Amino acid sequence: MESREDLNSILPYLPLVMRSSTLFWPSQVVEALKAMARGPLHSRVDSGELLFLAISDLRHSLSLSNHHFAPSFPQGYALFFDELMSREESKKWFEEVVPALADLLLRFPSLLQTHYQTADIAHINGVNTGLRLLRSQEPGIVFLSQELIGALLGCSLFCLFPVTNRGVEHLPTINFDQLFASLYDNYNEKQENKIRCIIHYFERIFSHMPIGFVSFERKVLALEHLPQCISYPKAEFWSNSVIPLCCFEVQNSGLIEDQSSEALEVDFANKFIGGGALHRGCVQEEIRFMINPELIAGMLFLPSMADNEAIEIIGAERFSSYTGEINKAFCGFFAPSKYQQYKRLFPENGCSRAQLDQNIEDPIGRSRSNLLSHDNASTSDETTEEKSVNQVISNYEEKGCESLGHEDNNIGIVTGNWGCGAFGGDPELKTIIQWLAASQALRPFISYYTFGLDELQNLDQVTRWILSQKWTVGDLWNMLVEYSYQKYKGQTDVGFFTWLLPSLFGHDTEMLDLPNMP
């Protein structure tokens, strides 16, 4: 075990000790956890105040006393467990959940050792899947059992992770002290509900421990050319792309996490995974980490993301419900398994539109020439340019996405208003950017949740019109560039959709002359 690079990279950030190839808790910690596992009659831990004192003793035994936590953490614990919880909830927590959690933590060293043994046996295509620090610019994947994740999150709840050197590696917060301290410092019902999601998670796993696995993958677009890698795209990559735009589905109601089709669900992430989930944050990313708490485990070993990086997490279970730029998107949407298909479409010396039309099938198995000629089989001499926008949209609606030949069994993208809330992004531009990225990544569809945003009330009409024109990624990208140039020069002050289709939005100006792209 001492010679394992993966373990040695993460060990400074774990509360365990390693000696003679064995991971273990210090003896004082073992005794304290054993007492807690026997229940409150033995441990005397039956309130938030006493639970905090027990946690303080554990931290002292781990030499973490000098690792400061949020000043109001003790008061936050007492407030939640002693006042905000009902008497019945508190009784169940201290008599059932805390003992079960202590028992799981006692097994944490053996769970981790088994994890590394399994990682040695179950290499995927020769790739290490063991728990380790997945540093920036180093692509890799980690597989964790849901039981091991439960133990890791138990350490977070008890604030047992060392924090001294996490800033040096650009790692996000992992202990829950700020989460509880924020509740006391400035009470907010949303903050209380965030904590309740965490508590519910522990109640659920100790009533029935899940037996699946969760994968955490750092995906990197290489900044220089490397074999078997897709490099970080330059502007010409997008401008010259002849990939057809994928199907676009508009969802004006509902939530991303409630969709039923098999798809990647987009988290509009802070560069630090989880964002303010363990602080006071309560927007899309933070909510997602609360209702799927297993996502929090990634905050232990995933440093901040650069512009050419994305993180993909698969298998995290949802335990609660609630009410309520382009290369980076491409990095997140692109599946490494499609690398050979991608290289076939784009050899190193480039590929012209004519070559693609004549020789290469598109990602879904139909020739590009057939794809483009599909709507031109009409006996009418009337061209698309001569039709009104609404008529074009209506005709396309009758055919729908089936006219593009996309297969339903391929994994698409489910997303929404990326960076359009607290970060003030333009919803129209963010929509188009994600559509371009999903199409270029060979995804069969993008399902877009507008969350009722007024700026996107005509999104369905706009995307159906664009699809009816049979534009490629490059065509739409170039329109976006032209719009951005005019916006920069002060030649237009309208949104992209209005600029593209003024007649649809009731403007008096002539509709742009946008010919079909043959």
Image (cartoon, grey):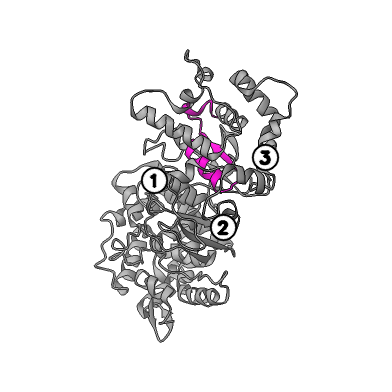
The disc, 3 or 2, on the residue closer to the chain's N-terminal end is: 2
User: Which residue is outermost to the left?
Assistant: 66
- Which amino acid, mark 1? Gln
Q: CA distance from mark 3 to mark 2?
A: 23 Å
Judged from the image, the secondary structure of the residue bearing numbered disc 2 is: helix
Query: Percent from the top left, x then y, of residue 513?
Result: 53, 22
Judged from the image, the secondary structure of the residue bearing numbered disc 1 is: helix
Q: Is residue 189 magenta?
A: no
For the residue carrying disc 1, how many other residues have a C-alpha within 10 Å: few (<14), some (14-19), or many (20+)?
many
Residue located beneath label 2 in the image: 339
The disc, 1 or 3, on the residue closer to the chain's N-terminal end is: 1
Residue located beneath label 1 in the image: 191
Residue located beneath label 3 in the image: 369
Q: Is residue 461 above or below residue 261?
A: above
- Which amino acid, mark 3? Ser
User: Which residue is outermost to the top?
Assistant: 508
Q: If the image is split into quadrants, where does the N terminus sit? A: bottom left
Q: Identify which residue, 278 or 331, lies in the foreground.
A: 331
The disc, 2 or 1, on the residue closer to the chain's N-terminal end is: 1
Magenta-colored span = 431-459
Q: Residue at x 50, y 46 (%)?
A: 266
Asked whether residue 287 appears in the rendered view, the answer is no
Query: Percent from the top left, x then y, of residue 62?
Result: 32, 73
